[in-house]
Amino acid sequence: MSLKKQFYTVYIFAKLSTRRFFRDRLALFFGILFPLIFLFVFGGIFGKSGNNVNFHVAVINNSSSSFAKQFEQQLTSSKIFKVDPKITNLTEANDKMGKNQLDATIVLPASFGTVKAGQTYPSGVAQVDYTQNNAESGQTLTTVLQAEFKDINAKFTKVEEPFNAQGIQLNKKSLTQFDYTFAGLLGFSIIGLGIFGPVNVFPELKKQGILRRLHTTPLKVWQYFVSTMISQAIIGLISISIMFAVAMSVFHLKVVGNYPEIALYLIFSIIAILGIGLALGGWAKNERQAAPLSNIIVFPMLFLSGTFFPRFLMPEWLQKVSTFLPLTPVIDGIRLMATEGKSLFQIGPQIGLLFGWTIIIYAIAFTIFKWE
Amino acid sequence: MAKPILSVTNLTKRYGDRTVVDGISFEVETGEVFGILGPNGAGKTTTLEMIEAMRPIDDGSAILDGIDVSKDPTAVKRIIGVQPQSPAFQDKTKLTELIELFAAAYGQHVKPMEYLNDVQLGDKASSYVENLSGGQKQRLSIAAALVHRPKVFFMDEPTTGLDPGARRNLWELVEEIKSRGVTVLITTHYMEEAERLCDRVAIMDNGKIIALDTPRQLVKDLLKKGFTKKQHVEQADLEDVFIDLTGKGLHS
């Protein structure tokens, strides 16, 4: 057969398998809606935090002075604190702190804000209560309060302190938690399509003899693989475009990279990861063989490659090991391009590593593929 | 005698120490319908699969239209059509698309409607394959297997599990395929099917061919041995009643 005819075969197989996907509600759910649900869940957790540090606190004001009242109002309207308005006494506050729903409790004693005899200005000590496992935020909170008091003190005493520190916000944004999460979720979506797809579908096709029937024709394994790659790349790009659109409109993701280059790297990533699915699904005789092995391969990758939480949170040795997993260059590459604005040429290490994996994965997939 | 399109010599298949096909030899002439009969497990399907280049041949040879099957399996696949025992297709595929797909597997571009009309499925053209009945699936599978105009058509127990109406409908289809000059190799364990369709039959048991001739000659030989049927045969049987009442092919 001429090469043109062989690619006509690939074209028709790719076209029909893409069509079938969009007709199949279950496939649509797992391929497109499922990653979106994860996006909403993780976006809801990490999307809003931004640069403002929020302390969930309760304020218990035992003082009747006007200064105390004013101070309490200031805390409530502050962006740094989120004051729980329902808590009015220490027992309720202690209960909530015990459940870790509250970072700390600020107690203003009865004498707070009163003017002591012989003085011209009000004074007092605000008490910050926190539990053992909230020590860090408790101490930070104490420091924040001390800084606030320092400003107030300066107004009353007019004494210039010899040394001080001043914080200046740079006109530059750092990566948010969501930037990491989003790249990870794209990795998750690529795994869902590329690995769980074939691992579920191929054993079923073998069981029904559908692959066997195709094998009675001159169809070659490479033709079958390439047509699957094309259709998965199309489906994957559509699914990921929807995720980008949602992340940008709902969770304020800022994409600074070049879209065609990002798309190119996504296609490469989808094809590389699909190879793992083709190898597993192509090798397995039935679901019982396919499922355990795919779980052994997929789950460590999901957790170690930065899908759900960034890799920089891991101990150093684990970071070194997980650098070389096939999903890591996918997630890192996408993040570097989309949110850090790197070009394809600047992510050479990621491309090189993924290319190496692609060769290995497909060499295995071709060798162990079985039609029945 | 016409030139044989298939010569099988000493064909053998072993699984471990069990010999499933035990050195069988036969020839099939161009344009004939050749039946392989036998009980379940006789080695019919394995024989077919070796000739179709789907299973390695352990010993002996099969030459199909001058091509040695074990030397050039791809060339063999291009000139044969295969009807599996229980046809299955991927869900959410339209009938026209399925024909398009199988033609594409041979690198060919065809008009699917022609093939669907040939097997009376024209009116189902834009249905999904999963909505077809058993008989309709068999006919679709035949259309898909003939999409590249093969020289030899293999049918593995095509009527197993079909109701009598669908079965007769399929027999007519096989006769139609034969009239186009296609050689047909068919396995079955229904004797009346073999009697009606096959020009010659090979009867297999335990991996060996124990008889090979025209159905009429096989019956004659049996009668010559002094065989008589114990019971007088009625002019019609229950199956004829069923066909008469339900109408041929209507529920196929």
Image: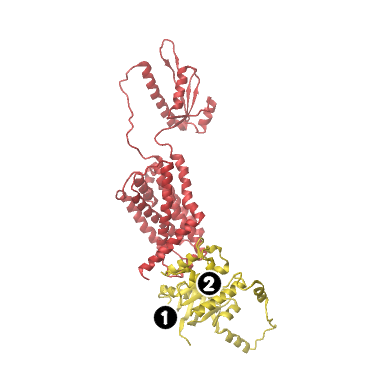
Between discs 1 and 2, the one toward the N terminus: 1
Name which residue lies at 54% across and 26% down: A91
Q: Is residue B15 visible?
A: no
Farthest residue in the top direction?
Answer: A118
Color encoding of the figure: by chain
Tell me the residue that label 2 is attached to. B119
Q: Could you say where residue A70 lies in the image, as x and y percent from the top left?
A: 45, 21
Q: Colour of chain A?
A: red
Tell me the residue that label 1 is attached to. B66
The correct choice, above or below, for B186 with respect to A330 in the image is below
**Mark 1 packing: few (<14 Cα in 10 Å), some, or many (20+)?**
few
Q: Could you say where residue B31 lies in the image, as x and y percent from the top left?
A: 49, 81
In the image, the chain rendered in yellow is B
Q: Secondary structure under badge 1?
A: loop
Q: Quadrant of residue A49?
A: top left
- Mark 2 belongs to which amino acid? Val
Cα–Cα gap, marks 1 and 2: 30 Å
Q: Secondary structure under badge 2?
A: loop
